[in-house]
Amino acid sequence: MTFPKSDVIWMNGKLVPWDDATIHIGSHVIHYGSAVFEGVRCYNTPEGPAIFRLDAHTERLFNSAKIYRMDMPYTFEELSRAQLETVAANKKEACYIRPIVYRGYEQLGVNPFPCPVDVAIMVWDWGRYLGQEALETGVDVCVSSWARIAPNTLPAMAKTAANYMNSQLIKMEAIKAGYVEGIALDSDGYLSEGSGADIGAKSGRRKYAASSMCRLTYSPCILPFGGTMPGAAWFGLSAGFAATGTGPAGFSVSDGASSIALTTTKSRPVSSSRTKRRRFWYVPSSVIVT
């Protein structure tokens, strides 16, 4: 499938034509994965295009950069405004937004400090992450043989490009085995996340989000009504999967969840087709693009 091009990409403060938005092959990010990013949705509403939780996503971007000692060359307000301007410049009513902060071209080596910190913002049309049919019939998923990274290896609380090499292993294994998505366990064998989606689970009358299942080993997620929490918390609260009570120390596959659902900023929540099927919806809290 051809990448759906937009008109312009925001790069270091300038709107650059899509095909001209390039970086040098010697850029640090290409060789060492030194980038943090966000995945944001803009929705078409009666009031016009609206960006879902722009403030929280931008805050998480800054937090990720701070963890990796990347000095942001723009303020919170400047990057928030840049995302609005990029959507407007591309005349999008609804789209996916990808702000990315990365180490650019200067020199190579594990030490990233000599390299500049560059920023870009892309927007494009991205449909249902797991396909339109996922909303209607659910998806087949497997438990991956690849575990999520442990919190003392790479900081999962940062949304960084390097973490997604782990996600690629999970996704490729699932596809090669005939599944749509893979579910990863954490280093202790408890439910963690999908390759690019969060997890909520139901067992009897008890409902759990991944953040209530075990320790803070998950990427931080955006709540639809304020704040951020680790793991699948925004999905859990918005879709009715918030923990009822304190929850167990960990939730495993063998605990027999009657319903498991996946969600990500890139798509609405969908259920696993091999569990009880339910459809979940949320009402975004948004910033209108003007």
Image (cartoon, rainbow, N blue to C red):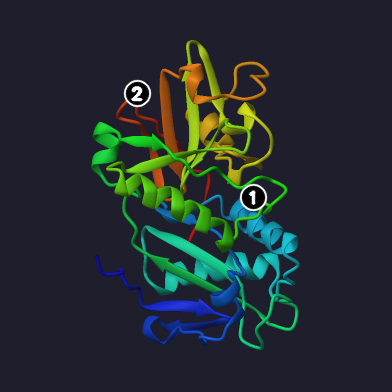
Question: Could you classify mark 1 by the number of other residues whose Cα lies within 10 Å: few (under 14), some (14-19), or many (20 or more)?
Answer: many
78 on left or right of 289: right
Above or below 155: residue 119: below
Task: Measuring from the top left, give residue 13's x and y in whole percent.
Answer: 58, 81
Q: Secondary structure at mark 2?
A: loop
For the point 52% across and 57% down, the residue is 164
Residue type marked 1: Ala
Question: Could you classify mark 2 by the number of other residues whose Cα lies within 10 Å: few (under 14), some (14-19), or many (20 or more)?
Answer: some
Quarter of the image containing the N terminus? Answer: bottom left
Task: Measuring from the top left, give residue 288's x and y in whole percent.
Answer: 49, 56
Q: Quadrant of residue 246?
A: top right
Any part of residue 63 in sight: yes
For the point 69% across and 52% down, the residue is 153
Q: Nearer the viewer, residue 146 or 136?
A: 146
Which residue has dot 1 on it?
A: 156
22 on left or right of 118: left
Q: Secondary structure at mark 1?
A: loop
Task: Measuring from the top left, give residue 248's x and y in whole percent.
Answer: 64, 19
For the point 30% across and 41% down, the residue is 179
Residue type marked 2: Thr
For the point 64% across and 40% down, the residue is 230
Question: Mark 1 or mark 2, which has the lower sequence index?
Answer: 1
Which residue has dot 2 on it?
A: 275
